[in-house]
Amino acid sequence: MYIFVIVAFTVILFSLPLAAEETAPLPPVDKIGDQDPANALSVPDGQIITLVIENDSIGGRGTDENYTSGVSLSYFNISAKMPEIAYTIADYIPTFDINDSSSVFYSFGQNLYTPSDITQSAQDPNDRPWAAHLYASMGLVTVTGGHVDEVEVSLGVVGPWALGRQTQTFVHKYITPDSPDPKGWSNQLNNEPAFLLGWQRRYPSILKASAFGLSLGASPHFGVTLGNVYTFAGTGIGFRLAPAEDDWQDDPIRVRPAPPGTGYFERPADNWSWYLFAGIDGRAIAHNIFLDGNTFSDSHSVDKKYFVMDANAGLALTYGQYRLSYSLIYRTKEFYGQDDPSVFGALSFGYRF
């Protein structure tokens, strides 16, 4: 699914010329601690646009079940002037500070969730609800004392206004004509405003070693997400392997409930570079609207599992100001009665200017 989006975005990106040297290149990273992330996020200029596509057709069985699809477009301004609302958010979150390293990002996206049999017009009482989520979000990233804090506020809608029926029907009809016609969207969750507030802290340089021109690091994280879409607490650890001279690269952007990441990357010293990453993330979930059903009205629901874990591994390739990354994700069963765990891929295209 969404192959046309992939092709169009790729053509646009690679039709653009490579940018000239940045006006103030980053100093060499030669210390462990707060220097490398702070330096990376306090350069005088730099903006990154990232398209993210998550789908089981690029990693799983392509059966359009459970987490069917997630697409987001993000704009990350590394050294933007903070909007006034950023200071208001920082005032209400005591763990978050705005300083010279603070950056801002904006995202727009849509997620689709369906039962295992999309050709069935009636709702299977033992399977998850049909649901779509359309949203826009703003996030802040800052570095303090060697750790990276991220805050994201998301507003949107769940239900028919999220256009899940239209999106999946269009794709199956015109992009993947061999796919079955989705017939159960009349059973989807009711329209409901969607709100999320997420906070996460990461320690990108707490464990790091260099040898043979390579840098190996581990980055633990923990965070909390609150809202009528998701409410959960999560923790995990990520691992990365990259050339030492291109050490500071951030994980590719992911769609919540996964840890979102920033998608930050530098222009490589030799014009191209690579980055291997893997990780695990566990979430204790109090509320998931896509399983618990509507918050303010009656709707179909299933008995969710209160603990869900993700495992992922992937590769990022950077050429000049372009980055292409792929992740394979394994997600444990999310509700009682779910036939199989979810396996899906995440593909992202980043352009820095």
Image (cartoon, rainbow, N blue to C red):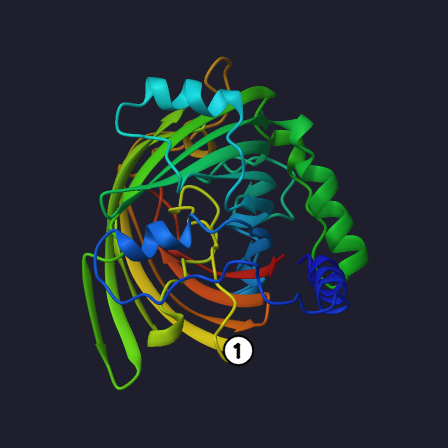
Of residues 221 and 128, which is closer to you in this image? 221
Toward the bottom, the furthest residue is: 212
Q: Amino acid at mark 1?
A: Trp
Of residues 63 and 24, which is closer to you in this image? 24
Toward the front, the furthest residue is: 23
Numbered circles on residues, count: 1
Residue at horizontal 57 percent and vertical 38 percent from the top: 106
Q: Quadrant of the C terminus?
A: bottom right
Toward the top, the furthest residue is: 296
Q: Residue 294: horizontal and vertical position, in percent?
A: 49, 21
Q: Residue 203: horizontal and vertical position, in percent?
A: 24, 50
Left or right: 132 in relation to 87: right
Q: Residue 182: horizontal and vertical position, in percent?
A: 68, 46
* Quadrant hosting residue 223: top left
Tell me if residue 293 can be seen: no
Is residue 68 shown above or below 159?
below
Q: Quadrant of the N terminus?
A: bottom right
Residue at horizontal 65 percent and vertical 67 percent from the top: 20
Residue at horizontal 57 percent and vertical 61 percent from the top: 22
Of residues 126 and 180, which is closer to you in this image? 180
Toward the right, the furthest residue is: 174
Of residues 267 and 156, which is closer to you in this image? 267
Left or right: 352 in relation to 253: right
Is residue 160 shown above or below 120?
above
Per the image, the residue denoted by label 1 is 272
Label 1 residue SS: strand
Is residue 94 shown above or below 198?
above
Badge 1 local density, few (<14 within 10 Å), some, or many (20+)?
Answer: some
* Quadrant hosting residue 91: top left
Tell me if residue 155 can be seen: yes
